[in-house]
Image (cartoon, coloured by chain):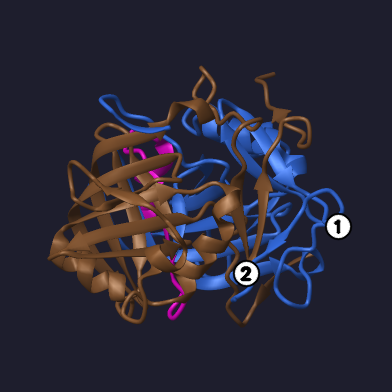
Chain colours: A blue, B brown
Amino acid sequence: MLKAIDHKIMHCYPGMVAIVTVSHNGENNVMAAGWHSYISFTPPIYGVAIGPERHTHQLVKNAGTFAINFLPLERAQFIQETGTYSGADLDKFENGSMLYTSGPATGAPILEDAYVVYECKTIDCNSYGDHDWFVGDIVQFHIDQDKFLDNGLPDFENLSIPLYLGRSLYTSVENTSRFESYRVTKE
Amino acid sequence: MLKAIDHKIMHCYPGMVAIVTVSHNGENNVMAAGWHSYISFTPPIYGVAIGPERHTHQLVKNAGTFAINFLPLERAQFIQETGTYSGADLDKFENGSMLYTSGPATGAPILEDAYVVYECKTIDCNSYGDHDWFVGDIVQFHIDQDKFLDNGLPDFENLSIPLYLGRSLYTSVENTSRFESYRVTKE
């Protein structure tokens, strides 16, 4: 039964993890972010929460650009590592054997194993509590079209999307034969 | 293969749907929002994107308060309806047979079938493209503790969390025996 409680909880998963990449003054970094959202479609705008103590924070702040990468389930280990380690201590790309190119619009790393990438130019940043909320115009889209159906939905026969559950656990929606979709229709 | 493209795409699902409720001057309303995020844990802060053309938008703007409700899979039909219909045209609570109480901190409707609710007081609102991004301090938490394990994770034996896929399709993570969790460990 639903009850008002006097302590705080955090329930916002299962959710997709956004892999934030950035390049500033020749330094490249990558970080997993669990708190992120599309904000506008026309024009396309994306937001992501980054803690000010993160090495990535200062790079994104100074670069004024970043990229949001989405990786498949096979890369869950890399996702978890980029959220755990700091770019101040090690090269997370090298550590995770992750190849990348330089984004044409922002210079931010475009992860070779990603199936969707949004290159963003920061248009706003506000501090809310223990995170800063970065908002960016999406200025360049990248997609692996083989992973999507003609109707725009992911092709779960060819793409396993990792969903973070909390406590270093991931699950996935991976195959149409293995999950039950529930189509809601108007009465 | 990942390629830069010259058109825009929207990939941000599968994702949980936030059911936004609001009460202003005796009028109660409810709306499904696909774009939302936790932003800070200390203090707890939540953000949600609401289109300015939505009836809920004006109510939230004027009330200065709102609530974020999460509903189980059994209520997917209601979720879809609250995103489709307008409170200007019909009473969505009555139409969907959804009972609610008045939130003690904000007066916003607390949906009886919800398993988690955040009552929020708006601390900021910015227009980004076709949506406004409302940011609120979470001032009161509500939880159905029977739906969660002692470690804070959802108890998938007792709770099916609906995940929106796009195009009126939902899936869910419903039972530990039916999904494979992938635990990532440090090397």
Q: Is residue B98 above or below residue A27?
A: below
Residue B177 image point, x, y percent: 78, 30
Q: Chain of mark 1?
A: A
Q: Quadrant of the C terminus of chain A?
A: bottom right
Identify the element where label 2 is drawn.
loop
Report which quarter residue B160 is drawn in.
top right
Report which quarter residue B142 is drawn in.
top left
Q: Quadrant of the N terminus of chain A?
A: top left
| Disc marking residue B168 | 2
Identify the element where label 1 is drawn.
loop
Q: Which residues are magenta?
A: A39-64
Tell me what residue is drawn at x 12 percent, y 65 percent.
B25
Q: From the viewer's perspective, is B183 left or right of B95? A: right
In reply to whether residue A108 is colored magenta, the answer given is: no
The three-letter amino acid code for the residue at tag 2 is Ser
Mark 2 Cα within 10 Å, few/some/many (few <14, many 20+)?
some
Q: From the viewer's perspective, is A135 left or right of A12? A: left
Tell me what residue is drawn at x 24 percent, y 50 percent.
B136
Q: Which of the pair A80/A168 is nearer the observer? A: A168
The residue where tag 1 is placed is A157
Tell me what residue is drawn at x 38 percent, y 77 percent.
B86
Q: From the viewer's perspective, is B168 left or right of A60? A: right
Q: CA distance from mark 2 to mark 1?
A: 20 Å
Residue A156 image point, x, y percent: 80, 57
In reply to whether residue A45 is colored magenta, the answer given is: yes
